[in-house]
């Protein structure tokens, strides 16, 4: 390629550029494969979260754990069974990476079981709360979590006397 620049009527500046844009077929193929892999691996920044929740070092028998995002985003909720949980947003187990406040609520089995209401229909009574109130409110909970892209295992040990 030749480039001619006229700075003044009596001065011509000629710049010759030689550009070699040759790339072999195999090098192009390798570059395309590399870009495709980066696109596939690099695009999914979602996370999964599982973990264990204990109360005074014993597995929490049952309960609910909720992750409240510090930034905008959806709540992630998990059911605690025998001390283990897995978070989900709706039907998906994927959540956004970031910082979260965490609440945990667990109640015992009602002593009376099922009772009947004024209309004679059975109603379920709620058992005594096993977890202290401080863990139930997103404004007061001391539990926090940082979720990173990929698989996360986040455990929490709650205390009856926090």
Image (cartoon, rainbow, N blue to C red):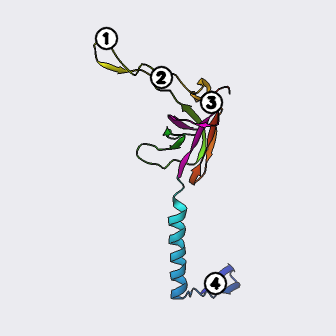
Mark 4 or mark 2: whose residue is earlier in sequence? 4
Where is residue 7? Give x, y as percent: 69, 78
Residue 158 seen in the current view: yes
Q: Mark 3 points at which residue?
A: 141
Residue neighbourhood size for the residue with mark 2, other residues' Cα within 10 Å, grouped as few (<14), some (14–19), many (≥20): some
As helix, strand or loop, the secondary structure at mark 1 comes to loop
- Gap in Å between the C-alphas at discs 4 and 3? 71 Å
Residue 19 placement: quadrant: bottom right
Where is residue 112? Give x, y as percent: 42, 19
Q: Which of 6 and 134 is in front in this view?
A: 134
Q: Name the residue under label 2.
A: 127
Which span is picked out in magenta? 47-69
Q: Which residue is drawn at 43% across and 48% down?
A: 92
Q: Name the residue under label 1.
A: 118
In this rendering, would 56 be left or right of 125? right
Where the C terminus falls, by quadrant?
top right
Residue 70 seen in the current view: no
């Amino acid at each position: 390629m030749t480039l001619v620049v006229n700075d003044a009527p009596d001065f011509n500046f000629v710049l010759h550029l030689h550009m070699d844009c040759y790339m072999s077929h195999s090098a192009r193929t390798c570059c395309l494969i590399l870009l495709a892999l980066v696109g596939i691996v690099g695009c999914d920044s979602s996370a999964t979260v599982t973990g264990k929740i204990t109360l005074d070092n014993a597995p929490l028998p049952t309960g609910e754990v909720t992750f409240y995002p510090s930034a905008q985003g959806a709540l992630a909720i998990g059911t605690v069974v025998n001390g283990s949980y897995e978070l989900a947003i709706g039907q998906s187990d994927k959540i956004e990476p970031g910082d979260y406040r965490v609440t945990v609520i667990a109640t015992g089995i009602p002593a009376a079981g099922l009772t009947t209401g004024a209309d004679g229909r059975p109603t379920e009574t709620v058992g005594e709360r096993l977890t202290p109130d401080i863990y139930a409110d997103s404004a007061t909970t001391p539990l926090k979590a940082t979720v990173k892209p990929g698989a996360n295992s986040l455990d929490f040990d709650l205390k009856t006397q926090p």
